[in-house]
Structures are given as C-alpha cells and as structure tokens.
C-alpha cells in the first residue's frame, strides 16, 4: 500500500532530517508512528500525503510511483487517504456537520445521499448535539473528534492520524482508538502518529520509531 | 459498530436530518444555489462590495459606450437613407443661356426617367435663401449668378439609373447631377470611425474590468489559502476549487452587471426625456438632427442587456482562469 525505499529529505541546503527510510505499510495493517518531539513524524506523514516531495529515494503509494504522478493522479490517491491533522484544520465558517461532510461534498455527491451517514458518524463520535455549531465554539476535544470524523467519513483505504488523542481525556482516547481499530478491522490501514505510550500499550500493533532521522520498525 | 454508521438509515427523516434539510431551504429560494450548502469560500473573505462597485462602474461605462455606438449606427443609417432617397440637379447660370429654360428642360428629362417619384424646382428666392447662412440676410443677390436646384425624390420601388440620367442631361450643358455619393461616403466614414472608437473603448473598459477581477481573484485566493489547502487534502480537484470561485464571482458579476446596465438604461431614458423637453431650443434641434429623439431602439436596450450578461460571464471566466493558473503555481 505504501512503500518507502531509501527515502531522504532535506530542506534546502540543510542537513537531512529523514535518512534512508525504507519500510512498507501493508494493506489492513495498524501501526503507531512514534518518536520524540521533532523527530519528523509529521514530516513523514506529509511525505505519504504527497504534500512534501522527498529529495531522494522512491515512494510508492497504492502501486504508483509518486514521482511520476500528475496533479490528477495526486488527487486520486489523496481520495484514498484520510488524514487527521494535529491542528485539526477545520474550516471555521462551516458547521461541524459541513466540515465532516466535506470529503463527500468535494466528490460531487448530492447532500441528501450522505446526510444519514454523516449524522450517524457525528453521533458516534459524540458530536450529535454539536453538528450545527462552528468550530470556534467547539472545545479542543470536540474539534479533534470532528477532525477524526472528517478523515474517516469517506471510508479511506489508508488513515493517517497525527496525534489524534492529544486533546482528549483518556476515556475518549480509548474510544477513539477503538474507532481506529474498528476501521482497521473493516479493511483500512491505519497509521497513528503519537508519543503517548499509554495509548500504544492499549493496542497490539507494530511500531515505527523515528529517531535522529532514521526509522526502526518493531513488528 | 462501523456498519451502523456506514449503513444508510431507512424510514422517516429524523429531526436532525429535517433541520439540516431546512437549512438548505435557501436552494428553493435561489435555485442556482440549490444543493450548494454553505459556500466553501466565506463571503467576507472576498472583497465583494468593492469589486461589485468596480464592476458596476465598468458595466455602466461599457453599456453607455455600447448604447452610444448603437445610437450613432442607427442615426448614421437614418442620415444615409434620407440622403440616399434624394438627388439634386444643379443648373448653373451662363451668359447667353436662359436659366429658366434650362431648368425646365432638365426637370422634363428627370420626370421622364424611371425611378423618380417627384421633381421640384427650387425657386430663385428659395435658392437665395439657401445662401443666407453664409452671406447674411441683408445682401441683394439679384445681380449674382446664383445656381438653381432641382430636387429629385426617388421612388422606393424602382431603381434609378443615374448614369443614364446623367447622359440624358448632357443636352443641357449647364446642368449637372449630384447623387450625394460624396456626402454619403463622408457620413459613412465618420459614423464608422465613431463606431470603431466606441468598440475600442468598449474593449478597453471590459479589459480593465477583467484585470480588476483577476486581481480580486488573486487576493481572494491568498486570503483563502488555508481553505484551498484543506480542500486539496480532502481530495478536491482544481476544477472543483475553480468552480467554487467561479460561482462566487459569477454572482458578483451578475449583480454588478445588472446594476451597471440598469443605471445605463436609466441614463439613456433620462437623456431621451430631457431631449424631448429641449427639442424647441437651438441646442435641442442640433441634438435631434444628429441623434433623432436621442432614444435607444430595442437594439440599444438589447445591447445593454448583452453587455450586462457579458460582464457577468467575463467575471466568472476570468476568475476561473486565474484560479487555475494560480493553483498550477501552487504545485
């Protein structure tokens, strides 16, 4: 599904911040991406999301060499990937419902066709009574859940979550982890970037550990 | 658990669904915005009011220019047709010849010629009156050799063979036929030049408006960069994003074009009303001579409607093209 071969990244003429990354994310897999703050977890997720290009190496996504993709090809691949951003990146002028429905709206689907599933998901993440409010009046935890709902609504083949439990209490963190595990069981590959060892201990999943620009995989 | 949320609920619409559906009632009030939901670009993030004012001014100027061009074209057609319906035989006085006899012979020839509906000899006093604007009214012209005119009104149904008439008038050596061709050419050239100038002005105004829209679009894109990024990341294609901008700017263009066009119609209606009030004054006579009643025909009003629509279309197309170009730049 995702394959990195000798991937390196440097910004400008600076030192390589990611060095010789070679790993694979198999279909239907669940893994944690961990490492100290500043190790490059978010950067690695951005490479998978194609918002950054490597300075060397080969990245293959869903069987396509990403270096050869045109813009439409990038868009097609992004539609298979759901992403939960660390800073949520909800659109402030849209309601929670509209934010969560956004990936379906950009696909050109009729609003009536996705309304029930968006409402169902919002209820499931505990935002059933907050769907008509804008993000400005949501708490950090509520924004987090809305961001997760937006990332999962289109049932992506790959889910990237950047510190998805950073703003929620332990009980909700467990619930969200159950959601990710549930998605994984239904066929989605999940990558959860976190440095919360408590969270990682709750799931039996492989760990990708980034340290000093290099990646170590613990199956 | 996921199956619950993935599966579609059947049966009646829940209260939540009903409230969301109610939120989309706007689509019923404004059919062109149906099923669009909240615009993905916040209205406040685009300098809408300033741009609408710019578009109103440009649409007004473009409509005034188009209307004026139409007015000139119609007036020119009217002058051409009224002058083209007449010809003149000029009989010059010459020593040893009886000018009255020459006038009669020339008018007889004209009357016999097919294609001429009416022949009228200008009397000596009428001929002298024609010279008054240049020589003044107190001058005695009795001793001056004033040429005389025969005015020929052409019939609508038949075509006059001017060459044949000119040849037949050869028996009257002092007579010459003036078919006003030179005047017609001058009028036509002048009118065509004015129309061309008007069209160039129209093109300049529309170009300036297109550039203003392009700048406004770039500003709107810069202000909405975060939204564009998010849309890209959730899988939006460039054409989806461009369509969002285009929809927004088309609406601004329709508002601006409509208001500008309406103001232009109002301006022409006011000018026409004032022209009818001033018709008895010397200035009013001049205006009437040039532009008739100074009122636009249906073609003039149609051209204003076309300009208003064109303004809206240009606004939408330019914003779309600008968005595409800038999105390519983001790569």
Image (spheres, coloured by chain):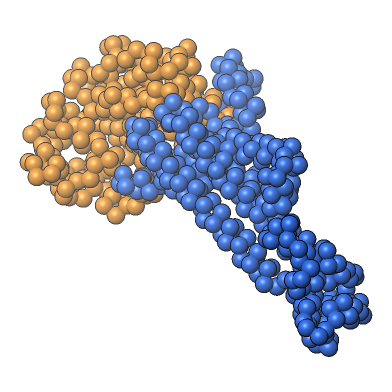
Chain colours: A orange, B blue
> In front: A23, or B263?
B263
Which residue shows up at 62% across the image and 39% down it?
Answer: B264
Q: Quadrant of residue A198?
A: top left
Would you place residue A192 above or below residue B310 in this image? above
Residue at 81 percent of width and 85 percent of height: B96
Nearer to the camera, A191 or B45: B45
Residue in the image at 72% along x and 52% along y: B289
Residue B236, quarter of the rendered image: top left
Image quarter hosting the N terminus of chain B:
top left
Q: Visible in this render: residue B220? A: yes
> Residue A6 at x, y = what percent?
15, 48
Count all numbered tags in the image, as a single digit. 0
Residue B124 position within the rendered picture, expressed as x and y whole percent measured from the top left:
83, 67
Say which of B62 and B173 sits in front. B173
> Residue A92 at what x, y percent from top left?
39, 22
> Foreground: B41 or A66?
B41
Please determine whether, in this image, residue B130 is positioned above or below residue B297: below
Q: Is residue A27 left or right of residue A149?
A: left
Residue beneath the point at 88% across and 73% down: B116
Visible in this render: residue B265?
no
Q: Taking B79 as reference, is B92 above or below it?
A: below
Residue B235 coordinates in the image, percent (x, y): 40, 39
> In the visual, does B38 lie left or right of A176?
right
């Amino acid at each position: 599904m995702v394959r990195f071969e000798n991937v390196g990244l440097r910004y400008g003429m600076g030192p390589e911040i990611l060095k010789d990354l070679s790993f694979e994310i198999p279909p239907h897999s669940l893994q944690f991406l961990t490492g100290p703050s500043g190790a490059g977890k978010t950067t690695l997720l951005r490479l998978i999301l194609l918002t950054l290009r490597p300075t060397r190496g080969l990245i293959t996504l869903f069987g396509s060499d990403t270096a050869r993709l045109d813009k439409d090809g990038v868009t097609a691949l992004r539609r298979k990937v759901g992403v939960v951003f660390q800073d949520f990146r909800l659109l402030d002028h849209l309601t929670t419902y509209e934010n969560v429905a956004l990936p379906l709206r950009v696909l050109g689907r009729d609003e009536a066709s996705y309304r029930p599933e968006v409402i169902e998901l919002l209820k499931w993440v505990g935002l059933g009574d907050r769907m008509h409010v804008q993000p400005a009046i949501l708490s950090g935890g509520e924004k987090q859940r809305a961001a997760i709902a937006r990332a999962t609504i289109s049932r992506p083949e790959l889910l990237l979550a950047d510190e998805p439990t950073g703003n929620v209490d332990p009980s909700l963190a467990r619930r969200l982890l159950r959601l990710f595990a549930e998605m994984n069981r239904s066929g989605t590959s999940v990558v959860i970037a976190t440095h919360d060892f408590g969270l990682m201990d709750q799931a039996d999943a492989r760990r990708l550990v980034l340290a000093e620009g290099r990646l170590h995989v613990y199956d | 658990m996921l199956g619950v949320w993935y599966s579609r609920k059947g049966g009646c619409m829940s209260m939540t669904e009903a409230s969301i559906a109610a939120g989309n009632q706007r689509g019923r009030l404004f059919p062109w915005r149906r099923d669009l939901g909240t615009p993905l670009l916040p209205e406040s993030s685009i300098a809408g009011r300033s741009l609408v004012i710019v578009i109103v001014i440009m649409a007004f100027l473009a409509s005034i220019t188009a209307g004026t061009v139409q007015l000139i074209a119609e007036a020119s057609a009217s002058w051409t047709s009224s002058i083209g319906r007449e010809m003149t035989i000029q009989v010059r006085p010459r020593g040893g010849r009886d000018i009255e006899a020459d006038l009669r012979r020339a008018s007889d020839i004209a009357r016999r010629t097919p294609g001429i509906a009416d022949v009228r000899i200008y009397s000596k006093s009428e001929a002298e009156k024609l010279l008054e604007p240049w020589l003044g009214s107190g001058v005695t012209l009795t001793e001056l050799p004033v040429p005389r005119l025969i005015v020929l009104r052409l019939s609508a149904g038949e075509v006059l063979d001017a060459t044949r008439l000119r040849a037949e008038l050869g028996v009257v050596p002092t007579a010459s036929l003036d078919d006003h061709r030179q005047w017609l050419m001058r009028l036509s050239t002048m009118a065509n030049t004015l129309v061309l100038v008007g069209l160039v002005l129209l093109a300049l105004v529309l170009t300036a408006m297109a550039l203003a829209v392009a700048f406004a679009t770039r500003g709107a894109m810069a202000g909405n960069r975060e939204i564009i990024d998010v849309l890209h990341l959730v899988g939006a294609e460039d054409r989806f994003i461009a369509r969002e901008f285009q929809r927004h700017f088309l609406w601004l263009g329709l508002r601006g074009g409509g208001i500008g066009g309406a103001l232009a119609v109002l301006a022409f209606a006011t000018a026409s009303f004032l022209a009818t009030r001033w018709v008895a004054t010397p200035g009013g006579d001049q205006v009437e001579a040039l532009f008739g009643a100074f009122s636009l025909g249906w073609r003039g009003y149609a051209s204003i409607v076309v300009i208003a629509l064109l303004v809206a279309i240009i606004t939408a197309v330019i914003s779309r093209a600008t968005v595409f170009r800038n999105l390519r730049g983001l790569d």
